[in-house]
Amino acid sequence: MQIPRSTIVDFLRQRGRGALADQAEQHLPEQVDPMQYAETLKKYGVDVDALLERLPGPLRRLFGGR
């Protein structure tokens, strides 16, 4: 399952990481599989678990969350 790049960019901006959000916006594909890109997301300062917590329940469950 993939999530929109904009979700990741918004996640970073809400945490005051505008420069990293700009980089992510330029380098990540439009749709991101957070498990496949976990290491890349970590380089942008994204905690995948925290990111997945922001997803609606049905999407979060697809990634193994509650």
Image (spheres, grey):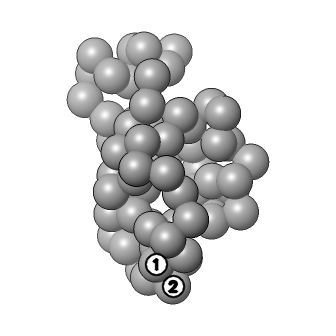
Q: Amino acid at mark 2?
A: Ala
Residue 9 lies, with reference to residue 2, above or below; the image says: below
At x 33%, y 57%, the residue is 6
Q: Quadrant of residue 13?
A: bottom left
Residue 32 image point, x, y percent = 49, 41
At x 65%, y 42%, the residue is 37
At x 54%, y 75%, the residue is 23
Please tell me the numbered disc located at residue 32. Answer: none
Disc 2 element: helix
Residue 29 image point, x, y percent = 49, 51
Q: Quadrant of residue 27?
A: bottom right
At x 71%, y 63%, the residue is 43
Please tell me the numbered disc located at residue 19. Answer: 2
Residue indicated by mark 1: 22
3D distance between C-alphas at marks 1 and 2: 5 Å
Residue 16 image point, x, y percent = 42, 80
Closer to the camera, 50 or 19? 19
Disc 1 element: helix
Viewport quadrant of the C terminus:
top left
Decide if residue 65 is in sight here.
no
Farthest-out residue, bottom: 19
Q: Amino acid at mark 1?
A: Asp
| Mark 1 neighbour density, 10 Å: few (under 14) some (14–19) many (20 or more) | few
| Mark 2 neighbour density, 10 Å: few (under 14) some (14–19) many (20 or more) | few
Question: Along the horizontal axis of the image, is 5 left or right of 57?
Answer: right
- Mark 1 touching mark 2, by CB under 8 A? yes
Residue 55 lies, with reference to residue 43, above or below; the image says: above
Residue 26 image point, x, y percent = 49, 71
Residue 58 lies, with reference to residue 2, above or below; the image says: above
